[in-house]
Amino acid sequence: MIASLRSTEQQLQSTLDSTYRNKSPLRTLWALFQGRRWHLLGVVICFVIKNSPVWVLPIVTGNIITRITELYTARATNPGLTDPTAVRFIAVNAAIMFLLIVQNVPTHTLYASLLSASVRQVQMVLRSAIVVRLQQLSMSFHDNAHSGKLQSKVLRDVEAVEGLSRLMVENLLSGSVSLGVALSITLSRAPSVALFFLITVPMAVMISRVFRHRLRKRNEEFRREVEEMSGKVSEMIEMIPITRAHAVEGTEVERLHVQLLRIRHSGRKLDTANNLFGSFAWATFQSFQLACFLFNIYQCYMGKITIGDVIMYQAFFGMVVGAVQGFLNIVPQMTSGIESMRSIGEVLESPDVEHNDGKASVTAVKGRITFDRISYTYPSGDRPSVKDLSLDIAPGECIAVVGESGSGKSTMMNLIIGFRRPTGGRILLDGVDMATINFRTFRRFLAVVPQQTVLFSGSIRDNITYGLKHVTDAQLRNALDMANCAEFVNRLPKGLDTPIGSHGGKLSGGQRQRIAIARALLRDPRIIILDEATSALDVQSEFLVQEAINRLIAGRTTFIVAHRLSTIRNASRVVVMKDGKMVESGTHEELLSSSESAFSKLHALQL
């Protein structure tokens, strides 16, 4: 299983690096079948064999009718005439058809199995590729992307691409083979009749070109409205507690109803375009079929072909028309699938990727962090969020970062984590420029305890050991004790294996924070970032969490972002930020000793 996952991961990386980028959607779809093309060859062979009755039946039908017509004509002058060879001829043809019909059962089963294996593999690889890319994309991308829209790409768009894959294989293969067989047989027997067949292909191309732009535009509009709806539904679900608490359910329903109306409108426009395209194509090719039938009747009237030939050619022309019309009928679905490929490309082709390949791996961290004239401006910002910041933090030092909202505290932490890269200056880790290191390897030595703890709907054990393997019970119990988790975990019905609900909804805020601290302790980090870790807690919970934090930060380089200034008394230094700049730095006592200091003024506001 693990070997299979590694093989899949390598294939995904190949898909991300070379397959999708800078290629047309259909070429990309073909590239996604890499490793499954032998299966596709098997699909083609099985399809030709299983569908052989469809192409042989017109020939057998025409031969039998011609033979019966000849016998009927002979009996007009010789009543009672029998022809044993005609009986044998009909019996042989019927036996051939029966055998061809029976073989369809095993060959169709094998065909369906090979096709399913290929298409489902493409579906899995594409979804996995999106998941991998989402993990690689920078935080700037995720700041601007809505989670509901991204979910729509992973679910709806990949489903549409899977449908496109089946259409490409099933309908195009069926149409191509049917067209080829019908044209080959007709050209060998009656080239003049084959001219009608040949006209249908350029006619189909012309019709598809006329409608192509409109279909693409309507599909794009509908896809974007569905993505918008997905995003708003995701927001609605997250907002239900607030919506219910403020009795504004009607407002939320109305907001969603407006979007539903927009989807209905764009959906009707798409349906109208698809139906107009389909009906126009049907009327065109039925007219061609009628013209071909009249031409064949004329040929028979002139004695150039038999009645059986009329039936055979008409059956083949019906097959050609069916094939060409089948091509046209799947144009709307193909347009939708191709639009979904473009939608997925917004993720897979995004250049906003955190690049770590080829950079130096971090194998050990002492904990010295140096800000060397650091500046950072957000892409959409008009002024720096952090400006000309210089600060040297020794290993094991605890730095408290305080300031008003928007002063640059969170940006400073994001720069340390590597979520943001400086737009000016540099950050050094143990004397090494962090622009040259692989952040993935660095983050193994880093732990973050945010204000809103991120938990998933598993057990307490799963959440604490997340991403770690081979954790012993002794290690886990030690982390629980140090984080003050044991006292409530032991009271739970299943202990560590108790499910905590979505986002840890079955736990209190203090319990969630202590689980986050236990998660950090288990990783034994060298650098810790505490971002407002106690700001939303009651007094008792804050005491337990603060006690756990004190154990966590002992001997480790620590950054504490705090609004409650009472929680940072034990910090080695306090850094005061304002408008992106460091305006003061010193110990808690030093900064409080001056009533004019910015820290003293902040402290006075909380008294």
Image: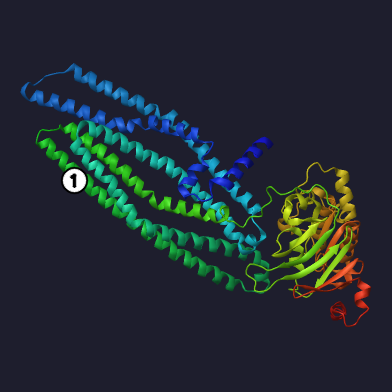
Q: Say what amino acid the circle numbered 1 marks.
A: Ala
Label 1: which residue?
291
- The vertical placement of 439 against 3, above or below, is below
Can residue 494 be seen?
A: no
Q: Residue at x 66, y 68 (%)?
A: 378
Q: Position of residue 471 (x, y in %)?
A: 82, 43
Number of marks in picture: 1
Q: Position of residue 138 (x, y in %)?
A: 66, 58
Instruction: Look at the numbered disc 1 and give the secondary structure of its residue.
Output: helix
Viewer-closest of 434 and 27? 434
**Horizontal side, residue 166 vs residue 542: left or right:** left
Viewer-closest of 121 and 138? 138
Q: Position of residue 39 (x, y in %)?
A: 49, 33
Viewer-closest of 468 and 294? 468
Q: Residue at x 27, y 41 (%)?
A: 318
Q: Position of residue 162 (x, y in %)?
A: 50, 46
Q: Residue at x 16, y 33 (%)?
A: 307
- The vertical placement of 193 against 442, above or below, is above
Quadrant the C terminus occupies? bottom right
